[in-house]
Amino acid sequence: MKSHREELWFETRERREYINITDKVAQAVRKSGVQQGLCLVNAMHITASVYINDDESGLLRDYDDWLERLAPHAPTSQYRHNRTGEDNGDAHLKRQIMGRQVVVAITDGALDLGPWEQVFYAEFDGRRRKRALVKIIGE
């Protein structure tokens, strides 16, 4: 069985951003040489997420609005976590809702995604360097 590990690095300009990483993940799959297997992609930070959905600008704004209603950033005093000197209690909750990771099948050397499915890295406490892990296993 083959195994390939790669890190994708991000430094967002905004506190919250949604980045389509499908092409980067597909490139890692090609580099791995795996024809049949699985590809795990996970955020390596507790205030970021990896998820799969449609890359449609209205939907991305809907996600952002929805998450902000569920766990608004301000006032930061509403989160006990922020009593530690942090201001990102909301980012931890947003990550919990959106999830840590995705697993995608690899078939014939390519990601086996549905017609509109795309892989995203979601950042909820950005403006600093962070990463996601791509781990590929198979034959």
Image (cartoon, rainbow, N blue to C red):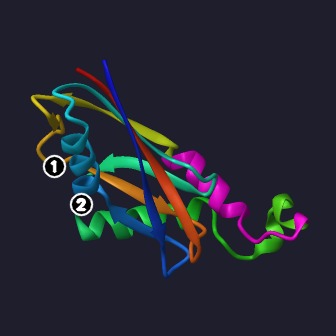
The part of the chain drawn in magenta is: 84-98
Q: Residue at x 64, y 53 (%)?
A: 93
Disc 2 secondary structure class: loop
Residue 91: % across, % down: 63, 61
Q: Residue at x 59, y 46 (%)?
A: 96
* Depth check, front residue: 34 or 80: 34
Q: Which residue is denoted by mark 1 in the rendering? A: 116
Q: Which mark is residue 139?
A: none
Q: Which residue is denoted by mark 2 in the rendering? A: 55
Taking 74 as reference, is 67 above or below it?
A: above
Proximity of marks 2 and 1: CB atoms separated by less than 8 Å: yes
Residue 40: % across, % down: 39, 35
Locate the N terminus and report the quarter of the image it occupies. top left
Residue 98: % across, % down: 49, 48
Taking 98 as reference, is 113 above or below it?
A: above
Disc 1 secondary structure class: loop
